[in-house]
Image (cartoon, helix red, strand yellow):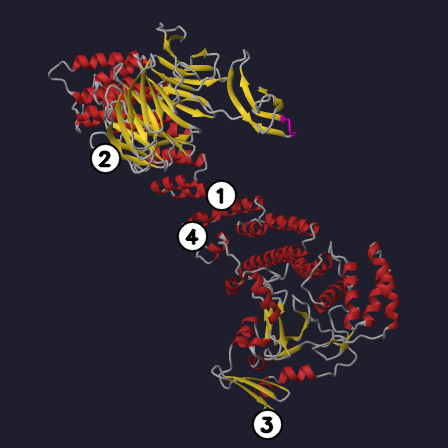
Amino acid sequence: LIGGSNRHVSLYTKDGKFLMHMAKMADWVWSVQARPKTLQLAIGCNDGTLVACNAMYNTVHGLFQDRYAHRDTMTDVIVQDLITDQKVRIKTRDYVKKVAVYRGRLAIQLPTCVLIYEEAKREVGYEMSYSLVTKVEQALDCNLIVVTALHLVLCQETRLQLYDFRGQKIREWVLEASIRYIRVVGGPPGREGLMVGLRSGEVFKIFIDNHFPILVVKHALPIRCLDLSASRKKLALVDEDQKVFVYDMDTNKVLFRDGKANSVAWNTNMEDMLCYSGDKCLSIKTGDFPVHQQPLHGFVVGFAGSKIFCLHSLEMQTIEVPQSPSLYEYLNLNRFDKAYAVACLGVTEGDWRHLAIAALSALKTDVARKAFIRIRDVRYLELLERIEAARQDPDCNESVLKADILAFQSKFSEAAKAYQKAGQGRKAVEMYLDLRDWTAAQEIVEKISDGKEMKYNGMNTVDLLKKQAEWLVDVNDYKAAADMYWGAREYETAIGILGEHKWLDELIVKVRKLDKTKRTELLLAAQYFEKHKSHAHAKEVYLKMEDIEALMRLHVKLDKWQEAFALAKTNPQYAKSIFLPYAQWLAMNDRFEEAQRAFHEAGRPDQSLFLLRQLIENAVAKNRYNDSGYYYWLLAQEHLKMAVDSNERNQKIAHESKETKGMTTREGRLLKRYLDFNEKAQLYHAYHSLFTSESQPFTTLSPQEIFDTSLFILRNISIDKTEVPYGVSVTHCLYALSKQCRDLGAFKLCRKVYGRLGDLRLPKQWRMNVELSSLTIRTSQFSDKDDVICVRCGSANPLLSERGSACVVCGHKFTYSFISFEILPLVEFAVQKDITDEAAEKLIAELPSASPRSHDNGGVQFTDDGEAQMLNIGGDDAGGFDGDNNDSFTRQLNNMDHGTSNQWPMITVDAKTLAGFNPREVFSVSCGHKAIPTRYFKSIISHLDNPIVQCRRCQHTFNEEEFEAYALQHARCPVCRVKLPEYQKESGAEQEDDPLEMMASDAVF
């Protein structure tokens, strides 16, 4: 870089050769410096200005087919063979202005002359080289230079000038519009042709030995790029709108168009293939097939074979493009010649093989041979030799040849069909025998035999199948061997193979084909199904055999209890044999309640009792007191049932011996345990509500319910003879009661409770609260807001007395609702001795026939005649129900003259009085044993005011509203947990089928 008084910054070579002016300044240049590794200059001038600028150089290059030349370091030209990637550098030692290349010629325009080089002839493998041929000693000014074999063509706006290598102008063409693009399309030396695209959209063909341009195409927009196909019959161009068009040179019709293109090039090796680039995408169009696209940066300048030449960032790149899509498109149209031409451009070995096999399948042996030679597949070439030899025979069947080709490709199924279609079924059998495909061979033999016994090489079908099966066993192909044995009617062997390998789905398919008289084979298959626990398949086989006993054993063995009990309903003789294994299975699966019932049904009460005791211990240990209460109730029922069964046996023996026997000692122990366990069940049931309310952060119990529940527990364990059940904490009961006493006004009871708590060892977190509360309660009055009123005598009882749940005056025992544990208005009474329990129940349930049933309380009379209900308040004749039928009960209830006795006599009613009771207000509790008489209770308050319900199983009483609320949520009794079907739909509880309940309603028992 040199600057000075001429106010220019000039570029020179190292030898001092002037190349070009880089910049012109307003004053002398005193300093100039280039930034290393960049094209940036810093220039300092005499006037004090400092200028930084970027040096910009135009791209100087030329291309013809696979030869590319471009300027390097301003004075050198590099010629590159794009196919072999060989390069040669030509040093001119002067500024290179233009470069043009054509076949073996290279033209380099310098400022004062044009150098003409010729490529030296070289043998294969030698490097490429160029030598200077001549020099045109003229300074030719032009926009573009093109070289041919013997001439130079210069372009100046609308003019084209033809010079020879001596510098003489031979010819000149003047066109109507400026020239945008020139491409040399080849031709004989001295008669080459040019394709010229103008800004006006016209495309001319010019032969350099002809004065007249030939108009080829008149396009609507300026031409940007163009190219001519190899056969000179199609013209592709890109216009100013970046759209590509393909014209037919003969008709000038548009054959193809597309958008987003900046350059286009035809494949020099194939007529119907072109490519174009644009929008960072390379598009390849072959014939009439859809365009294939792939990403590409730059623009296309050439296309030869499978190589596309792309100029990107002043660098020429050679891109290999796949020709497979075009190849397969031609194969789909069975155009094998075109497909072979595409393959020659460059495809993978797999594509060559596909072409060869497709041509072979179509018996295009010439194309197939060339393709197999290309991939060097000797096996297929030998096959081709045999096929061509066979085709020389006039009787040759081409269908058989095609079948041979399919077999050679391992398409045996298609080959077999082709053989049979061609009437050569024996060749198909031979093929499958060679392949050891016995099944296919058997099928073809059966088709050939046409239903008749046929032997092939001395073997009939069965022998063929047996031989095949033996061979399959030897090679460990057991599934196929089983199929062959089955086909040979060796059923047991086939079943054994399938069963041992657990191929049960295949086995059941074959068993279904057997006749039910094949009992040995069916039994063997069922045993395998049972062994591998395939219940559905084994069941199907046993049903086919009609072996009910084996089917029952299957259900029991595989734990299919629903089906076992369903089968027992239709076959009662097998019913008793399934209860014990069912009970054991329930116990193993933690379904202890059902297991207890099953042990009982199986006649093993010892196992049932043992299981219940274990369940009680575990439930108490885990603080599941509601479960403990339920299990204690079940245990009580077990002892009661044993006592009843013992009594019935004794009575039967006494009847047979005509002797009178009383209750045995064993019955007495059982009944005592029954009463004890029943009482513990009630305590655990009550304690569960209390424990959860104290141990859980939230509770659904109201303060009154906690108060009543605590009192119920304390009343029933306050008697000296009553043992406190394990796990029930008196401390918890007292502490829970103390927290509610103050709020409910039971100050006297509160003092008593705190006094008892003071004598006990309390948890550390409770003691401070109890001690403080026991002091503050002394400031309250020494009385209780409410006392317990006895429904028998009307006396006021302390909330907690020494007599527990009995009245301190008359000794009447309180009856509770076993949800909230409030005291119910029920008075216990007895019936006359001449009235049996059955008669009493009948009298209670029947409506009087003479008069409608009515009820009177304090002048309020309710009458129900079955059709209408009437309420009479303050009527004069208010009598009826209470005045007539209830006289005996009312007199005894109102009789207070019993002296100082604290145990009043039981109210006893006759049949007439009993028949006058409202059934909704009378309840009975019967255990079923004569030693424990039935207890009867009557509500002294109308069922309209205080409805009471009784569980039909455990016979506990409840307030009706509380019971319905619980039943709607749980659909069962809170004590005995009997299911209540009438509430199950409302509760949404899922009801599972219980096998024991399935049997209970049947005539089996």
Q: Secondary structure at mark 2?
A: loop
Question: How far from the left and from the top, in percent, is residue 853?
Answer: 53, 83
Q: Residue at x 53, y 52 (%)?
A: 601
Report the magenta residues as a range.
Answer: 44-48
* Residue 139 in the image: above or below residue 492: above
Asked if residue 46 lies in the magenta stretch, the reply is yes
> How far apart are the alpha carbons under marks 1 and 2?
84 Å
State which tag comes first along the sequence, 4 or 1.
1
State which tag comes first along the sequence, 4 or 2.
2
Residue 408 in view (yes/no): yes
Q: Is residue 73 left or right of residue 153?
A: right
Residue marked by disc 3: 876
Residue marked by disc 1: 559
> How far apart are the alpha carbons under marks 4 and 3?
63 Å
Residue marked by disc 4: 569
Q: Nearer the viewer, residue 772 or 715?
A: 772
Q: Which mark is residue 253?
A: 2
- The answer to whether mark 2 and mark 3 are in CB contact below 8 A is no
State which tag comes first along the sequence, 4 or 3.
4
The amino acid type, in three-letter code, at marker 2 is Lys
- Most common secondary structure along the magenta stretch: loop
- The answer to whether mark 1 and mark 2 are in CB contact below 8 A is no
> How far apart are the alpha carbons under marks 2 and 3?
123 Å
Say few, some or many: other residues with alpha carbon within 10 Å of mark 3 (under 14 / 14 to 19 / 20 or more).
Answer: few
State which tag comes first along the sequence, 1 or 3.
1
State which tag comes first along the sequence, 2 or 3.
2
Q: Nearer the viewer, residue 487 or 928?
A: 487
Q: Residue at x 40, y 42 (%)?
A: 539
Say few, some or many: other residues with alpha carbon within 10 Å of mark 1 (under 14 / 14 to 19 / 20 or more).
Answer: some
Quadrant of the rendering where the N terminus is positioned: top right
The amino acid type, in three-letter code, at marker 3 is Asp
